[in-house]
């Protein structure tokens, strides 16, 4: 597979993810996550926003010092003070240090937040990229609120920052507003209308306000984006960011129509997700794709029978591929005799067909009263129904 088809994974769990209400982490916790992201083999770790606080500065510096594989990015607004401070923390990563500078480009942000004209925004962006490029060639520029920016102006900004030395240009959907077909067209337009676009990697950064962050990121990849920005468990501002595990597993699972590779060692996904949840205290919803407790659980009898015969009947990826040891057959009122019998086997009961049938009747009656039947319930049924007689 050619190099253009390798998608860089830029993890921003420690920066945009940390902007989730209640997700703030201390330096030691950030370092633990950073080491886990290193094992996951992401391409870039955005470690923080160095000017935001002393703690953030220190966290970026420590991550830059101790992580050896991935590049380390630090965010900064498009002004000298932010950029200088970011490099002060990032310089410990040497060539792997990436300055990520941004300014908003949409009319609504320029008018109400920045109070700047188009010309001033371009000038500020170019000046920032040049200053950052004085420290390192590894400069990323983000056009905040790009999706709500008039396209010809966005193209002008992208062209100007590439000419100023940006090696990655990010097109964020800052407010999670776009849909896949629109985002595809934006990326395609930039690919086709910006001079020297091939000199930079086009990056995408989607928020999940409409639940479309992963779908939008995949559409952008199909349109030619070379980097996806995302977070573990999809944590981030408001409804969160594009979820790393979902986008990576979609790319891995649908190679037939998404022939793009990432370097992520997917077997580290589940441990990384659990570590983040433990550290932040943000519980993962059970039905969350890939890492939710039910993502590899089957309750319906027909499904359980299917996966006992052949896993691919109801599993599109293996639990092992994300680092789980096996799938889970949950016993409840929809479960059938096959899963019930298998669980009794696993618990060490050697029962006759007749005993299994008897126990199964009791199990169904109990399952109508309870949401889930646990091993202790099965022990009780067997003790009561079979051993007793
Ligand atoms: O959502 C956004 O626009 C951002 C940028 C700062 C990259 O997080
Ligand atoms: Zn963001």
Image: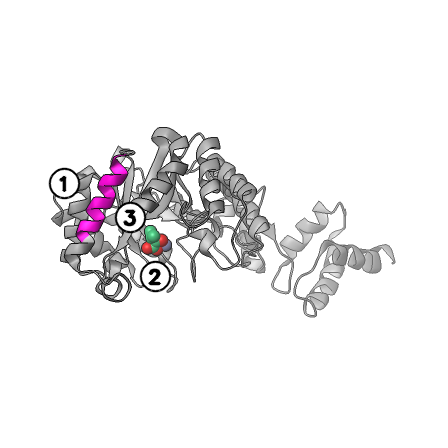
Residue at image mark 1: 196
Asked whether the beta carbons under mark 1 and mark 2 sit within 8 Å of each other, the answer is no
Marks 3 and 1, how far apart at CA: 25 Å
Q: Is residue 70 left or right of residue 326?
A: left
Q: Nearer the viewer, residue 68 or 101?
A: 101
**Magenta part, dominant SS:** helix
Which mark is nearer the camera, 2 or 3? 3
The quadrant the N terminus occupies is top left
Residue behind label 2 places its C-beta within 8 angstroms of ligand 1: no
Q: Earlier in the sequence, mark 2 or mark 3?
A: 3
Asked if the residues shown at circle 3 and circle 1 are in contact, with their CB atoms under 8 angstroms apart, the answer is no
Between the C-alphas of marks 2 and 3, the distance is 26 Å
- At mark 1, the secondary structure is loop
Point out the stretch of residues depicted in magenta: 122-134
Q: In the image, what residue occupies the spot 54% across and 59% down?
A: 285
Q: Which residue is mark 3?
A: 79
Taking depth in this image into account, of 94 and 375 the one nearest to the observer is: 94
**For numbered disc 2, what is the local secondary structure?**
loop
Residue 42 at what x, y percent from top left? 41, 38
- Would you say residue 162 sits in the magenta stretch? no
N-term-proximal mark, 3 vs 1: 3
Rendered-image quadrant of the C terminus: bottom right
Disc 3 is placed on an element classified as loop
Residue shown at 26%/48% (left/top)?
222
Pointer 1 local density, CA inside 10 Å: few below 14, some 14–19, many at least 20: few
Earlier residue among tags 1 and 2: 2
Q: In the rendered view, tell whether residue 148 sits above or below residue 158.
A: below
Mark 2 lies on residue = 176
């Amino acid at each position: 597979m050619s190099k253009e088809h390798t998608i860089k994974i830029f993890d921003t769990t420690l920066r945009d993810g940390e902007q989730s209400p209640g997700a703030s982490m201390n330096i030691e916790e950030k370092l633990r996550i950073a080491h886990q992201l290193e094992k996951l083999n992401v391409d870039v770790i955005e470690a923080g926003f160095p000017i935001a606080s002393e703690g953030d500065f220190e966290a970026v510096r420590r991550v830059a010092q101790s992580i050896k594989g991935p590049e380390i990015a630090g965010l900064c607004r498009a002004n000298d003070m932010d950029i200088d401070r970011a490099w002060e923390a990032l310089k410990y990563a040497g060539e792997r240090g990436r300055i990520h500078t941004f300014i908003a480009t949409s009319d609504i942000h320029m008018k109400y937040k920045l109070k700047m004209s188009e010309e001033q925004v371009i000038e500020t962006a170019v000046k920032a990229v040049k200053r950052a490029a004085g420290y390192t060639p590894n400069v990323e520029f983000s056009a905040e609120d790009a999706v709500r920016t008039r396209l010809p102006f966005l193209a002008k900004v992208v062209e100007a920052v590439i000419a100023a030395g940006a090696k990655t240009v990010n097109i964020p959907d800052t407010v999670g507003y776009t849909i896949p077909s629109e985002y595809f067209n934006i990326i395609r337009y930039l690919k086709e209308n910006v001079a020297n676009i091939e000199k930079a990697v086009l990056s995408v950064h989607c928020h999940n306000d409409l639940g479309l962050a992963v779908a939008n990121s995949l559409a952008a990849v199909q349109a030619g984006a070379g980097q996806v920005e995302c977070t573990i468990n999809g944590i981030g501002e408001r409804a969160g960011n594009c979820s790393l595990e979902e986008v990576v597993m979609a790319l891995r699972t649908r190679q037939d129509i998404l022939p793009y590779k990432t370097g992520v060692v997917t077997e580290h996904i589940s441990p990384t997700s659990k570590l983040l949840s433990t550290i932040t205290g943000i519980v993962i919803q059970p039905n969350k794709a890939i890492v939710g407790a039910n993502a590899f659980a089957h309750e319906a009898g027909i499904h359980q029978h299917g996966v006992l015969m052949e896993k691919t009947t109801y599993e599109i990826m293996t639990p092992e591929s994300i680092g789980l040891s096996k799938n889970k057959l949950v016993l409840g009122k929809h479960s059938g005799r096959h899963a019930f019998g298998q669980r009794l086997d696993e618990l060490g009961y050697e029962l006759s067909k007749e005993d299994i049938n008897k126990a199964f009747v009791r199990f169904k009656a109990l399952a109508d009263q309870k949401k889930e039947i646990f091993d202790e319930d099965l022990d009780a049924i067997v003790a009561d129904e079979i051993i007793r007689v």
